Amino acid sequence: MSKDRQFDNFDEFAEDYCEMCNQVVKSSGANRDYFSEYKIVELLKFEKPKEELRILDFGCGDGSSAFFIRKHFPNAAVFGVDVSEKSITIAQKRNITNTIFNKFDGIKLPFKEEEFDIVFTSMVFHHIEHKLHKGVLKEICKVLKKEGRFYNFEHNPNNPLTKKAVNECEYDKDAVLLKPSYNKKITSNSGLKVEKLNYTLFFPRHKLFNFFLGLEKILTWCPIGAQYYVKAIKII
Ligand SMILES: C[S@@+](CC[C@H](N)C(=O)[O-])C[C@H]1O[C@@H](n2cnc3c(N)ncnc32)[C@H](O)[C@@H]1O
């Protein structure tokens, strides 16, 4: 990792990103779309999907999550930002209705205060230098409305299979995974009240394991899921 790394810009991976993801998750028995959609389905546990929400996908990449946000939140206005211009161009080419993608500098969000009901982010914070997390969270807090919700999905460094996959993945070569306790702490210190730390993805997605998938909803406390998310609410 270079000494002056701030964050990983995915321009060099943008075109092949989807295929690279598919390769990384292949052994799990599901594809990249499956893993993009499951996170949005998690949001449905807490949100009212028919409401006219304003939703920001922070570090939206090629727009894969935004596609599923649109699908499950049909009345929402969806926005995506990323530091990677090439990823943003690919996202824009998806022509997702009522969805706007913009490149930004990775530090200061190009929105006014209190514009969003929900800020969602997936697999982005481990691509940002840890000392910048505080500033990024402050920006996210700033653009959230009062009582707006923040969902931060991350890889779980406590899961050996996740760690192996990250270590072997080219676009994760500079990634530094966030311990769940650290993630919770930095979120709490940014004007956000942490309401949940939930673990996800305990079993492979091969048919053989279908029976066990139902157990995942009662295992959210168990700190060995392959991923986890922090849900927080803006209180100030
Ligand atoms: C592993 S990809 C995840 C993309 C997308 N969220 C997804 O789940 O498919 C990480 C993304 O974070 C973006 N990124 C890195 N630093 C960022 C920052 N400071 N602000 C916003 N996006 C950033 C990268 O350009 C890349 O598109």
Image (tube, rainbow, N blue to C red):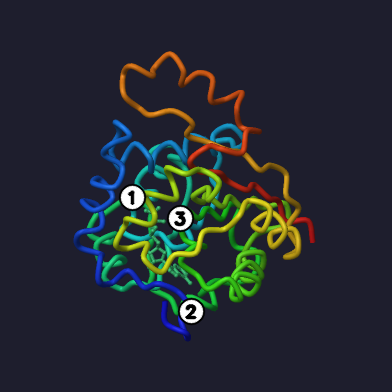
Q: Residue at x 50, y 57 (%)?
A: 56
Dot 1: what SS? helix
Q: Which residue is mark 2?
A: 6
Q: Which mark is residue 95?
A: none
Cβ of mark 1 under 8 Å from ligand 1: the answer is: yes
Amino acid of disc 2: Gln
Image coordinates for residue 53, horizontal then vertical, percent:
55, 48
Q: Is residue 201 above or below residue 24?
A: above
Q: Earlier in the sequence, mark 2 or mark 1?
A: 2
The image shows residue 186 at horizontal and vertical percentages of 69, 62
- Alpha-carbon distance for marks 1 and 3? 12 Å
Element under disc 3:
loop
Q: Residues within 10 Å of mark 3 (few under 14, many from 20)?
A: some
The answer to whether 54 appears left or right of 195 in the picture is left
Q: Which residue is mark 1?
A: 64
Q: Which residue is mark 3?
A: 123
